[in-house]
Image (tube, rainbow, N blue to C red):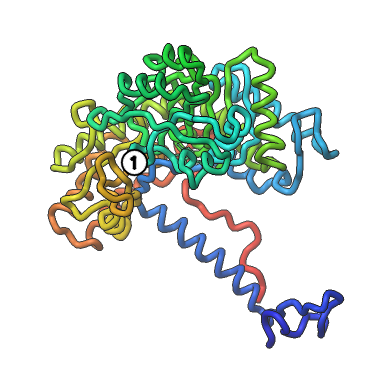
């Protein structure tokens, strides 16, 4: 059977374009479909057995999940509700208006836009709206925990803005306020981004607010990681602490679909217009209506369950930090209780370095990621791992289970326990925590693979 260019086509020859599409052998493509399904099922089963500690991940509630495969997935709705470029959007408009209402209510603000399709796209929308190429924009260094959006090879570079780096206090794992004030006064950036991917403590926004006003810079908060904690009233309140806009992903501590959002508290119609046109047509065309509908559900569920969930996420992170510290791990910011968020930073040089440790943990069923830490000599040799508690909390684990997770780390990385033994212990621990909490379908299987139509016939 021919395949690739020059192969015989299904209808037996070269088409009008002169190009013959590849012809799969009988049953070959049904086999590929089955293969993809089997891999995703295997992945789901693996995560069901694992201890997932990636700080940027979470589990979607069943009521949100079912909307991802609804007909909304198949439609377009460019523009704003009531002002679309397509017909057939009546229900889409109602859902989007509901979604916007829920977002404004959850974050106590006057403006929301749910059209950015991810956190990075939300950041690009803000850059499009509030900065011009060549502008100076304040941010943190990647080595101090910033997201790649702030890098020359990321969103900043794409918009052509020049980063102005804040000073970092590595002991306290937050900005050095006095030195950052000096930098802002000397350089006078137009826009100042606050927010991190290794986000342990609230940003000192209130302390910096007078300096932002003095130099005429707008405050911008990237809440991708901590959005669910902010919504739960457990972290900080950027829109009342000096930031004009929040951009964020909606799937980390806020356990929604993979999507993005913009939020602002403002009566400035010009600002609203700029943010809206930053989102569309600036950086999106269609805005993934199935995700938008799922986001509406997740926002409603967070209004109902988010306070308690956010509190427990942080309680677990602090408990895990303490339990690891008690077992000899170098958890950063020990004097400050390790964290005020969902995230911990652990220096693991003596255990073999971030890369080796993250790999060994994964082999033993504990999923985390290597991470650069302040003071690392090379970006290619991260000295730490980042741990997060959103997912283990979502399946109902508490401080007692954080002790048991720390024992897994200790056994594997300090006491020479075999990987298979630790993997067995991890799976045994997890077997009691495989259903969802903090949502309306609490008790539903968290890692279920939804088989709609069965295996395709060969
Ligand atoms: C601080 C921060 N901003 C933005 C993003 C990008 O989010 P997304 O993956 O939704 O594009 C991330 C992702 O982890 C992040 O940590």
Image x and y of residue 4, in percent: 67, 79
Res. 401 in view: no
Mark 1 is surrounded, within 10 Å at the Cα level, by few (under 14), some (14 to 19) or many (20 or more) other residues, namely some
Q: Residue at x 58, y 25 (%)?
A: 263
Q: Toward the viewer: 338 or 33?
A: 338
Mark 1, ligand 1, within 8 Å: the answer is no
Q: Residue 294 sits in which quadrant?
A: top right
Residue 319 placement, left or right of 18: left
Residue extending farthest to the bottom is 1
Image x and y of residue 38, in percent: 52, 66
Residue 338 placement, left or right of 244: left
Q: Residue at x 47, y 38 (%)?
A: 150
Image x and y of residue 3, in percent: 67, 82
Q: Toward the viewer: 400 or 198?
A: 198
Q: Is mark 1 on a helix, strand or loop?
A: helix
Residue 238 placement, left or right of 372: right
Res. 110 in view: yes
Image x and y of residue 73, in percent: 70, 47
- Which residue in the structure is indicated by mark 1? 143
Q: Which residue is drawn at 34% across and 37% down?
A: 144
Q: Residue 261 sits in which quadrant?
A: top right
């Amino acid at each position: 059977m021919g395949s690739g260019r020059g192969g015989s086509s299904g209808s037996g020859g070269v088409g009008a374009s002169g190009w013959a599409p590849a012809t799969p052998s009988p049953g070959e493509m049904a086999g590929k479909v089955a293969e993809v399904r089997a891999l995703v099922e295997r992945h789901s089963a693996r995560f069901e057995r694992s201890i997932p500690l990636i700080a940027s991940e979470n589990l979607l509630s069943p009521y949100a999940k079912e909307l991802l495969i609804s007909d909304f997935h198949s439609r377009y709705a460019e523009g704003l509700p009531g002002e679309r470029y397509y017909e057939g959007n009546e229900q889409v408009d109602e859902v989007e208006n509901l979604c916007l209402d829920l977002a404004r209510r959850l974050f106590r603000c006057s403006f929301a836009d749910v059209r950015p399709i991810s956190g990075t796209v939300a950041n690009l929308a803000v850059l499009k709206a509030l900065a011009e190429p060549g502008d100076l924009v304040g941010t943190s260094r990647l080595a101090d925990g910033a997201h790649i959006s702030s890098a020359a090879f990321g969103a900043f570079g794409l918009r052509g803005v020049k980063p102005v780096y804040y000073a970092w206090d590595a002991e306290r794992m937050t900005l050095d306020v006095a030195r950052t004030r000096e930098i802002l006064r000397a350089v006078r950036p137009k826009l100042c981004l606050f927010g991190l991917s290794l986000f342990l403590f609230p940003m000192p926004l209130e302390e910096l607010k007078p300096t932002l006003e003095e130099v005429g810079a707008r405050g911008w908060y990237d809440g991708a990681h901590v959005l669910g904690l902010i919504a739960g009233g457990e972290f900080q309140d950027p829109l009342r602490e000096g930031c004009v806009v929040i951009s964020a992903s909606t799937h980390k501590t806020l356990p929604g679909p993979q999507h993005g959002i913009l939020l602002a508290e403002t009566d400035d119609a010009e600002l609203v217009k700029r943010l809206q046109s930053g989102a569309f047509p600036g950086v999106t065309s269609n805005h993934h209506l199935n995700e938008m509908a799922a986001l509406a559900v997740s926002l409603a569920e967070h209004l109902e369950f988010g306070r308690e969930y956010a509190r427990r996420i942080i309680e677990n992170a602090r408990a895990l930090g303490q339990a690891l510290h008690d077992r000899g791990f170098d958890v950063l910011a020990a004097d400050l209780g390790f964290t005020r968020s969902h995230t911990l930073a652990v220096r693991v040089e003596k255990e073999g370095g971030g890369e080796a440790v993250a790999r060994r943990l994964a082999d033993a069923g504990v999923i985390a990621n290597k991470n650069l830490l302040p003071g690392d000599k090379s970006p290619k040799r991260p000295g730490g791992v980042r741990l997060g508690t959103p997912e283990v909390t979502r399946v109902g684990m508490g401080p007692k289970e954080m002790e048991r997770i720390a024992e897994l780390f200790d056994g594997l990385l300090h006491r020479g326990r075999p990987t298979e033994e630790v993997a067995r212990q991890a799976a045994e621990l997890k077997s009691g925590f495989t259903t969802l909490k903090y949502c309306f379908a609490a008790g539903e299987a968290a890692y279920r693979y939804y088989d709609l139509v069965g295996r395709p016939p060969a």
